[in-house]
Amino acid sequence: MNKKKLFRWIKIIVLIYCIIGITFYYLQDYILFHPEPMSKNSTYKFDDAYNEINIPYNKETTLNVIQFKTKDSIAKGVVLYFHGNRKNIGWYAKYASNFTKNNYEIWMLEYPGFGKSTGKFAEQELYDYALQVYKLARTKYKPENIIIYGKSLGTCIASQLASVRDCKYLILETPCYSMTSLVSHYFPIYPVNKMLHYHFPNNEHLQNVTAPIIIFHGTDDGVVPYSNSLKLKSVLKPNDEFVTIDGGSHNNLNDYPILHQKLDSLMK
């Protein structure tokens, strides 16, 4: 290959590199998050008893929260559940029984743009919204009766909340080490740290969590690689737990008895 052809190929490769990088930078919200909005007048049809509340946050933001109730009139406590980057609470409601059967209420926060929530979707705002839900829970429950639970994207919000507020447990299902490290796994040749609008440093937040931490992750996770989550072991306390689910993928850990056995033991 002569120098002229080589130079032409180099220009093509650089151009492709730039196009992909620029496209990701400007479209990252659409690539990373896949919400399903709902009209404010629409209704849910859940099997479990629930209350639906709306928290006015500011002029632009209203936070929709679904509170799944226990059969007993007096609950042991509440699970603050932060869901993943897809769909809305209608999809995650199937997990409510994992907690209500153990006499824990479960409150699910809908992020802005998801379900019926409106407002700004940004990293710091998500932390602030979660704190509002925690404050609401504290009007009814003591910290030792509050469990903070995150799934996928929700682990990033849950870990930050538990780093600044007390709780009984912090439970994380399929967490990433950080959003930066996760995206770098898929785009290793890009300066991801400078490109991302969202960093979600789970590794930093977990170092400030005083409550016991329990992590669930499957070895066949095709979204958040098991190896990425496994790095969180380095920041866990001696009595924290990292539960490996052999063969588990990103969205099917609920099918494994080991997850239910562990959750049941924590809520006794």
Image (cartoon, rainbow, N blue to C red):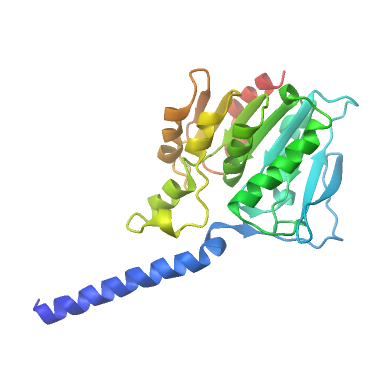
Answer whether residue 93 is visible to the viewer in this image: no
Direction from residue 264 to residue 46 in the image, left or right: right
Residue 104 at x, y percent in the picture: 78, 28
Q: Quadrant of the N terminus?
A: bottom left
Direction from residue 212 to residue 37 in the image, left or right: right
What's the residue at 51%, 39% (across, down)?
202
- When asked about the image quadrant of residue 150, the answer is top right
What's the residue at 85%, 59% (across, down)?
42
Residue 126 at x, y percent in the picture: 65, 49
Toward the right, the furthest residue is 73
What's the residue at 56%, 64% (across, down)?
30
- When asked about the image quadrant of residue 14, the answer is bottom left
Is 157 placed above or below 73 here? Answer: below
Residue 25 at x, y percent in the picture: 46, 65
Is 75 placed above or below 181 here? Answer: above
Q: Nearer the viewer, residue 5 or 247?
A: 5
Toward the left, the furthest residue is 2
Residue 170 at x, y percent in the picture: 62, 30
